[in-house]
Structure formats: structure tokens, C-alpha cells
Image (spheres, rainbow, N blue to C red):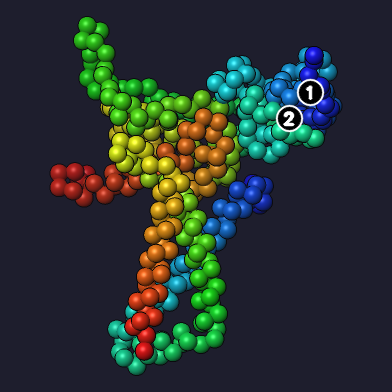
Amino acid sequence: MPEPSRPITIEVLRYQPGSAPEPYLQSWTIAFTDDMSVLQALQHIKDHLDGTLTFRWSCRMAICGSCGMMIGGRPKLGCQTFLRDLYPGPVRVEAMSHFPIERDLVVDSGDFMAKLQRIEPWIVPREPRALAQGEYLQTPAQLERYEHFSHCINCMLCYAACPQYGLDPTFLGPGISALLTRYNFDSRDAATARRMEVASSEEGVWSCTAVGYCSVVCPKQVDPANAVNLNKTASAVDWFARFLPGRGK
Amino acid sequence: MQGWWWRDPYFMRFMRREATAPFVAAYAAILLAGLASLALGESEYNEWLEALKSPLSIAFHCLLVAIFAYHTVTWFAIMPKTMPPVYLGGKRVAGALITGAGIAAAALSSILIWILVSRGAP
């Protein structure tokens, strides 16, 4: 027996540079079943009602981090948000806050990608090692130090949640701080000093005002607010360490 | 971004927490004034004590108690976000337990000080 369907209205803040100079709201009422996500609603609209609706998506299972958007004013993954929880609606869908909009729900992630490059998001080995010497070993305790920070899927929801990033886009931001911590806390890595220069800079972790909403909206429980604050401590320790004998500049 | 804190109840709670900070600073100033008057001499210190007993001061202190309680609870609520993971017996201590322990410690020490001050009062 087919699942009963219910009607719901989806309102999308559209931006179509070229055909309309200003963003505008457009609504569609569709029938949904209990297993339908907001992403599926957008796919239904694109396939059957308006082929010009533009949005990013890929995996449909909260792994790729492509379908971040504002749903009811909150940063969420479209694939992880179900229409049954938003009934009777209407459901307002907008592009992620704090990012320049390219078209409809697609934002320009160039700033995030540039910041990601700055923190060298890869393991920098302590010493060169030949393949024959085998793998870099790590204990479960060493893995646990950084593992949850490595779950970041670069969805940028934490940036859409961060008012500080909205006020000052030069701020390094929560997600990049979490990834920076992921590598700095890895026992196999040796680039902590270089990444701490980024973390301790003017636009680094000290710009955070500890709102903490980044950790609330994170779909992977990465806890970027904790990463930022751990780096504040590390940055302060670095600063005071210069007064120790043999460490002064 | 103007008025961004109205957008979400979470931001409103954050702003409420931040708004308690000037009151904490104000109370620190009151205590510092007491310390300064103690350094100046006995009569100055007694004047400070008398000033604390004024109805305006008592009303302000009642307000401060409520604000400090809110500040304490919200301060410990964010505490797990500010510290490295804590392990007990090989297991990671949950954030809620750290928050609960902090609030309990603050409440117990407040009660203890209350008892000590009550007993010492003439």
C-alpha cells in the first residue's frame, strides 16, 4: 500500500543574476510522504515544476556536506532535514547565511577553501620515511585526541551559524579551526608551529566570542567551539612560553 | 548583520549571558572599594560597611544574587566547550557531568560561605 501523502508549501529565496537583479521568494506546494527530506522536495521541484531551481547536492546521506542551506532560518543539511518534522509548514529555504550567493541556494565557498589551504590540511611527517620502513603507528589514545575533529565534512553550516563570521568574514572561523586542531593533535604531524601562526593571528581564534552555535548546528558532532577554545589556550601558552629561559625571541 | 541576536533564541540566550558580565565587574568594583577603604583605615572601612547596609545597596545586592546565579549556571554550561577532554578511569567525562559538578561546587561553596558569615556576624 502506498504511503499517504500530505501537502506542504516550500518557499525558496531565489537569486537569478541575469534575469532578476534582486533576490525574490517563490513558493511551490507539493505532496510529500514521511520519508521525504527537504533535499528531495527541492529535487522534486527541479524535476517536475521548475528546472531552473539551483542547489548543490551529492550523497543524500550527510557525508558529502554539499546540501547546506538555511531551513526555517537555521543552518541545516537538506538531506538530513525531514518534511514531516516541518509540517504543516510553510518551509522557508534560503542560501547559507554569511556567504555570497552565486545562484538560488548555491553559495560561493571560495573564502572557506582559501582558509582551508592556509592551515595545511594534511599530515606533515616528522621525518621522511621510506615505504619499506612501514606505516606510522598510533595508539588508540593518540587517535582519540583528534578523531572527532576529523569527522568534519566541510559543509560550512558552522560558518552560516557563526555571527562573528557574519560580522567579520576575515575570521578564520569554526570549521577551519576544528580541522587545524585535527592535524595539530595528530601524533604523526610536525607542522603545529606553522598552524599556530594562523590560529594566533589577528583573524585567528581570538576573534571568537564563544557564542557556541557552531557546535549546535554541526551535523557530525565535531564540536568546533571546543576546537577554537583549545586553540585559545594553546595560543596563550605559546605567548607566555616566550618568557621561559631559552625560549625568548 | 544589524540586530543579529534577534534571529534565533540561541543568540538571545548568548546575549543574556554576556549582559551579566558588567554586573560581575560592578561587584568586583564594590569589593575593591571595600579593600581600598580597609587600607585607608578603620573609620573608612566602617563607612563602606554602613554604605552596604543602605536600602539601595540591599536592593542592588538582591538583583546581583539573581544575576550571579544566572551567570554561574551559564558559565559552567559553556565550560566543557573551553577545556580539553577529561578522562576518568579511561573513559571520557561527559560535558553534562562537568557542568553539573561546577554548578554543584558553586552552590556548595556559596552555602558554606553563607554559614561562615552567619556564624561570624555579631
The residue carrying mark 1 is: A32
Residue type pointed to by label 2: Arg
Q: Is A123 or A6 nearer to us in this picture? A: A6
Q: Position of residue B13 (x, y in %)?
A: 59, 53
* Tags 2 and 1 touching, CB below 8 Å: yes
Chain under callout 2: A
Up-down: is B3 above or below B91? below
Q: Which residue is mark 2?
A: A84
User: Tag 2: Cα neighbours inside 10 Å, few (<14), some, or many (≥20)?
Assistant: some
Going by the image, does B120 lie left or right of A216? left
Amino acid bearing label 1: Phe
Q: Quadrant of residue B43?
A: bottom left
User: Is there any visible trace of residue A119 in the rendered image?
Assistant: no
Q: Secondary structure at mark 1?
A: strand
Left or right of residue A161: residue A47: right
Marks 2/1 same chain? yes
B85 to the left or right of A41: left
Q: CA distance from mark 2 to mark 1?
A: 8 Å
